[in-house]
Image: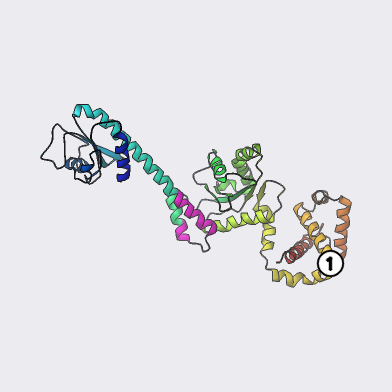
Amino acid sequence: MLDKILAERFIDKISEFTEYNVNIMNERGIIIASKDKERIGGFHEIAYKIITGDEDIIITEHEEHNYLGVKYGINMAVFYHHKKIGVIGMTGNPDEVAPILKIMKMSVETMLEYELYKEDIQHRKNLKDQFLNLILYGEDTDLYSLKYYASQLGYSETAVRIPILITTDGKVDTSELLRKIKEGSLHSYEDISAVTREKQIIIFKCFDRSKILQGTYKYVIGEYLGNFLAFLLDRDIECHFYIGTFQNELEEYRKAYQQCCWLRENVRAKSRGVYFYDYAGEYLRSLVPFMELHQIYHVFEELLDEKNQDDFTELVDALERNNYNLVDSSKELFIHKNTLVFRLNKLKAIFSINPLQKSNEREFLKYMCEYFRRKRNGF
């Protein structure tokens, strides 16, 4: 565990400030770094005795011919997590070198902890990158690997999480933006977050099950992202938040992420926060095979010219988004309410229906317009 390169780097540094010879030995008692380069690779019997025995410090008052590779001085155990992993020794009068060696020992232990901490951080980052790549881009669901990575990273497999896809306009450092989110007090260790290949932010936000029902989840998400949104707006960074579906099985996360992407590509958002459950009907309609729609509606396409198809599709989409409120729909379309009523009456007359009163006739129009739209866009 005591790295040779790290030990040599330490010896090179302290050699600038002391004339005493300093040695560092590994867990097998081998000298892996020394100011006296000729001693590197030799066996240090006292160091081995410290590693394998109960003593943490051994002082030799003079050169010990009974011990292999030992000169007079002090040798002290180096610890990591309360375990002996090596020995540091200094040649010289024990009374003189003891205070210096104690400081060096603490320096080695501190440096070792920091280096291993950096390795742990990098190892965790690598694991997390592989975990997120598997979730977001894996073609085949490998449940065993998903569970392995979740376990290694300390994530609960069965926690309820909801994906939040965050998009920003302009040239921004999304890694820094994600760091800002993670600094928030409401970001928990069970929240899984990353920057996607498209330089967008994805967060699988862990949820208290009691806050999922009754619509309170929107308030929880709003509170979670509130300070971050204010941070963006203060800097004139335009953004949107696409919130997907609740999941408690790792193998469903990729689908939930794809549903966020579907929102991003298909929903014209009035607000910055777009919730999948508000558009579940549109999503499910998009899954209907085109040939099914064609078989049901192709005759209507032949009876209506392209302008009528486009006008009716625009009208029905606006009415759907505004719960068939005529005033709000006309505002969205930037037309007078009377103009909208005229178009609606034309629609009612052609098909002999009244979607304002009958939900089944609304369904007829929704799927017909879905057919027109997909036919126009090349399916």
**Percent position of residue 319, x then y:** 79, 54
Say whether residue 35 is left or right of residue 114. left
Quadrant placement of the C terminus: bottom right
Q: Which of 356 and 260 lies nearest the eye of the viewer?
A: 260
- Total marks placed: 1
**Up-down: is 118 above or below 73?**
below
Q: Which residue lies furthest to the left in this view?
A: 66
* Helix, strand or loop status at disc 1: loop
Q: Residue furthest top?
A: 95
Disc 1 residue type (three-letter):
Asp
Q: Which of 64 and 249 lies nearest the eye of the viewer?
A: 64
Say whether residue 47 is left or right of residue 221. left
| Residue under pointer 1 | 305
**Up-down: is 218 above or below 249?**
above
Secondary structure character of the magenta stretch overall: helix
The quadrant in which residue 228 appears is top right
141 within the magenta span: yes
**Percent position of residue 18, x then y:** 27, 31
Say whether residue 36 is left or right of residue 206. left
The residue segment tinted magenta is: 125-146
Label 1 crowd bin: few (<14), some (14–19), many (20+), radius 10 Å: few
Residue drawn at (48%, 60%) of the image: 143
Please indicate, yes or no, whether residue 272 appears anywhere in the rendered image.
yes
Residue drawn at (77%, 69%) of the image: 297
Please indicate, yes or no, whether residue 157 appears anywhere in the rendered image.
no
**Percent position of residue 300, x then y:** 81, 69
